[in-house]
Image (cartoon, grey):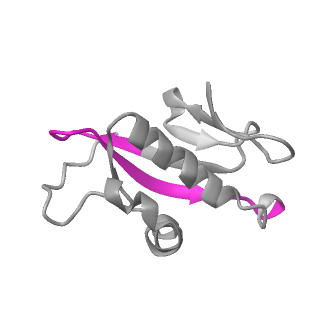
Amino acid sequence: MAKESGAGEREEIVWREEARRFETPDGKAYLQYRLLPAATAVMDLAHTYVPASKRGRGLAARLCDAAFAHARRHAMRVLPTCSYISETYLPRNPEWKELVLTEEEPKPSSSM
């Protein structure tokens, strides 16, 4: 388990490589991803979940921040299939759009 971010009173976000998740330490809020086979590494951000008890703290965005920062550090492209990421997070955080797989790039086949 590797720490991706977190400080002060904010709940930290951890990367659980074996589970293919970025999550809170208790595992209740998470971003699930899968790696897709492609010429360049592609991380499909498939699902983001924050339980009602943790909503309103910005956790969904922080989970996304950790995933996109991870992708950048590892020279990966991102396929945002999660509707929260594609419809809410990316419009609010355009600085990450450079990592998003474009229409011109060949789409990799799905794999878990």
Question: How many numbered discs sit on the rendered protein?
Answer: 0
Furthest residue toward right: 9
| Apparent side of residue 67 relative to residue 53 in the rendered image (left or right) | left
* Residue 71 locus on image (x, y percent): 41, 42
Residue in view at x 14 percent, y 57 percent: 105
Range shown magenta: 34-53
The one nearer the camera, 83 or 3, is 3
* Residue 44 locus on image (x, y percent): 37, 50
Image quarter hosting the N terminus? top right
Residue 82 visible in the current orientation: no
Residue 52 in magenta stretch: yes
| Apparent side of residue 7 relative to residue 88 in the rendered image (left or right) | right
The one nearer the camera, 73 or 47, is 73
Residue in view at x 37 percent, y 33 percent: 74
* Residue 58 locus on image (x, y percent): 71, 61
**Position of 111 relative to 97 (above/below):** above
* Residue 82 locus on image (x, y percent): 45, 63
Image quarter hosting the C terminus? top left
**Position of 73 relative to 103 (above/below):** above
Residue 33 in magenta stretch: no
Residue in view at x 53 percent, y 72 percent: 92
Furthest residue toward front: 95
Residue in view at x 74 percent, y 36 percent: 25
| Apparent side of residue 14 relative to residue 90 in the rendered image (left or right) | right
Residue 13 visible in the current orientation: yes
**Position of 36 relative to 90 (above/below):** above
State which quadrant residue 98 falls in. Answer: bottom left
